[in-house]
Image (tube, rainbow, N blue to C red):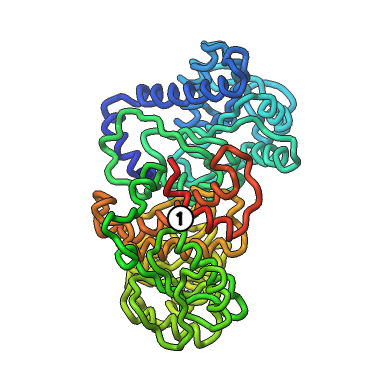
């Protein structure tokens, strides 16, 4: 399981080494790891390292120092390196190392428009360059390093540095493309702890981070700019403490998926009750039931209108349908709310909520949570950002969808605090959190998952996992009971994301193709076979 730590945790872990005078050694380890990663990328892209071009956008702090030292290492391997210094000062030792290795350095003019001249920072006289010249230098490179702002920075890019990134973003938006971009520790402008974004941010293909993944790399919106995350050990990892955010990897998913015992039967494999769908949205119920069956539920009971029950009986004869107003039969967990409208279905949802059993609370049933304080972590709410904003507003914290998307981690934690429930916040980076527990962030899917009914399938998958007992506390180790419900939600998100990749062909190395929610539901079962 991958763990992420806050910037404060990493700084505290580094402090004893810094106090012992090992700052230069930590920087050497970090920058050498960054250089090795770029070397591998160059070899994969070009077949060789010698003769490649690498440009670094270099800030004035230690993050810029890491970038300068990495460029120096690359220069010694025969790479043509250029450092574009975006501030009036630079890390003196790193700059000296770069120049000694034969690298080139230029300084971005403070207003971005001075067409020549030089400046003296005490280490070297460096030519000035305009924004356009700096942009052209970046575009010509095979790899571009973002080493402007590190974990100690406050706020986003400003001045000429912001102007340069905006020019590069324009290049990308107009289809002219950019080189492979690698962030040094954190993409500039992304808060390393919260993932919140200030000012323009250059999305990267990969982030090479040091000592530990920073939580901001796993939390939206910043996570969307971080690309693939690679952690370089620098010798302080044993002092990091417990992670603040976790992410399940492929091995975790395979280990945690429930598998039937030899002596099992349909009741021991879990009975799921589904109160979903309506005459207006019948497909939501069908998709939730299909997702649940594909995720291994031993039995699915549907409760709802006769017209929806008839549709389900025709498509999924395994489902036992009940059309009366009262809930009945053995049930171990519930899916509530997907596609629900009308008072009769909402009343069934209220009945299920009163039983004290684990339940997935989705879509129309989310409004029931705002009626009174719940304080039940076994209820897993599954809103998207807009629904979470409406829930928070009902509970007294007024906000809109844009605010939730800009502060996803903080908004999720506040909603969990106010409701006492577990919440799965849906999105490209799905966040799962429960009271007193750790936060999970999963990014297993594909953009092809953004299709009508996809969330209904997810609700069914999560309900099936709950009916089968969820992730056992013993399986999530030191998180204990505090991680049980959020871990189950994260496992469902991982299964759903991987099913999307299987259905779209991406899991087999393809570029991907359009899929429907039915395709996702069908593919869920194959996640159990995936390596």
The residue beneath circle 1 is: 493
Residue 370: name its quadrant: bottom left
Q: Residue at x 40, y 59 (%)?
A: 296
Residue 466, visible in the rendered structure: yes
- Does 162 sit above or below residue 275? above
**Horizontal side of residue 332 vs 274, given as left or right:** left
Which SS class for mark 1?
helix
Q: Is residue 485 left or right of residue 177?
A: left
In front of the other: 280 or 75: 280
Of 61 and 186, nearer the camera is 186
The answer to which image quadrant residue 103 occupies is top right
Please tell me which residue lies in front, 301 or 368: 301
Q: Residue at x 46, y 53 (%)?
A: 525
The quarter of the picture where residue 192 lies is top left
Using the rendered image of the protein, determine whether residue 198 is visible from the camera's viewpoint: no
Looking at the picture, does residue 19 appear above or below residue 523?
Answer: above
- Disc 1 crowd, CA 10 A, few/some/many (<14, 14-19, 20+): many
Residue 522: percent from left, percent from top: 53, 56
Question: Horizontal and vertical percent for residue 124?
Answer: 56, 16
- Residue 455 in the image: state x and y as whole percent: 53, 63
């Amino acid at each position: 399981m991958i763990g992420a730590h806050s910037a404060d945790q990493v700084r505290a872990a580094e402090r004893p080494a810094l106090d012992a005078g090992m700052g230069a050694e930590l920087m050497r380890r970090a920058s050498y790891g960054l250089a090795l990663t770029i070397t591998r990328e160059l070899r994969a892209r070009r077949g060789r390292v010698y003769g490649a071009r690498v440009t670094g956008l270099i800030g004035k702090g230690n993050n810029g120092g890491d970038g300068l030292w990495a460029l120096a290492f690359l220069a010694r391997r025969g790479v043509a390196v250029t450092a574009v210094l975006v501030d009036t000062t630079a890390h003196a030792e790193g700059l000296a190392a770069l120049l000694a290795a034969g690298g080139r350095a230029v300084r971005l003019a403070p207003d971005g428009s001075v067409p020549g001249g030089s400046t003296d920072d005490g280490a070297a006289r460096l030519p000035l360059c305009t924004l356009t010249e700096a942009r052209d230098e970046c575009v010509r490179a095979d790899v571009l390093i973002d080493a402007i702002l590190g974990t100690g920075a406050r706020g986003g890019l400003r001045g000429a540095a912001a102007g340069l990134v905006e020019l590069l973003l324009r290049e990308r938006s107009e289809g002219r493309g950019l080189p492979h971009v690698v962030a040094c520790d954190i993409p500039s402008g992304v808060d390393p702890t919260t993932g919140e974004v200030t000012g323009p941010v250059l999305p990267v293909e990969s982030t090479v981070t040091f000592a530990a993944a920073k939580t901001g790399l796993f939390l939206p919106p910043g996570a969307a700019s971080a690309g693939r995350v690679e952690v370089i050990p620098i010798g302080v990892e044993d002092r990091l403490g417990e992670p603040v955010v976790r992410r399940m990897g492929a091995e975790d998913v395979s280990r945690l998926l429930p598998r039937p015992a030899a002596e099992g039967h349909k009741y021991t494999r879990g009975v799921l009750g589904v109160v979903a769908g309506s005459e207006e949205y019948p497909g939501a119920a069908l998709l939730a039931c299909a997702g649940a069956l594909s995720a291994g539920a031993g039995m699915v009971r549907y409760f709802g209108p006769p017209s929806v029950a008839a549709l389900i009986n025709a498509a999924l004869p395994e489902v036992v349908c009940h059309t009366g107003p009262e809930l009945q039969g053995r049930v171990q967990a519930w899916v509530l709310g997907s596609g629900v409208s009308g008072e009769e279905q909402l009343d069934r949802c209220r009945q299920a909520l009163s039983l004290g059993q684990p339940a997935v609370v989705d879509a129309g049933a989310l409004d029931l949570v705002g009626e009174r304080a719940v304080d039940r972590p076994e209820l897993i709410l599954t809103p998207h950002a807009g629904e979470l904003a409406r829930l928070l507003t009902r509970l007294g914290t007024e906000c809109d969808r844009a605010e939730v998307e800009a502060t996803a981690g903080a908004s999720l934690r506040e909603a969990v605090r106010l409701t006492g429930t577990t919440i799965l916040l849906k999105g490209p980076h799905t966040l799962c959190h429960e009271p007193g527990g750790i936060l999970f962030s999963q990014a297993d899917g594909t953009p092809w998952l953004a299709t009508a009914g996809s969330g209904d399938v997810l609700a069914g998958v999560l309900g099936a996992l709950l009916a089968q007992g969820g992730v056992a506390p013993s399986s999530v180790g030191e998180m204990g009971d505090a991680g049980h419900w959020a871990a189950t939600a994260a496992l469902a998100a991982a299964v759903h994301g991987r099913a999307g990749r299987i259905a779209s062909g991406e899991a087999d190395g393809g570029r991907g193709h359009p899929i429907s929610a039915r395709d996702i539901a069908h593919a869920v079962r194959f996640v159990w076979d995936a390596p």
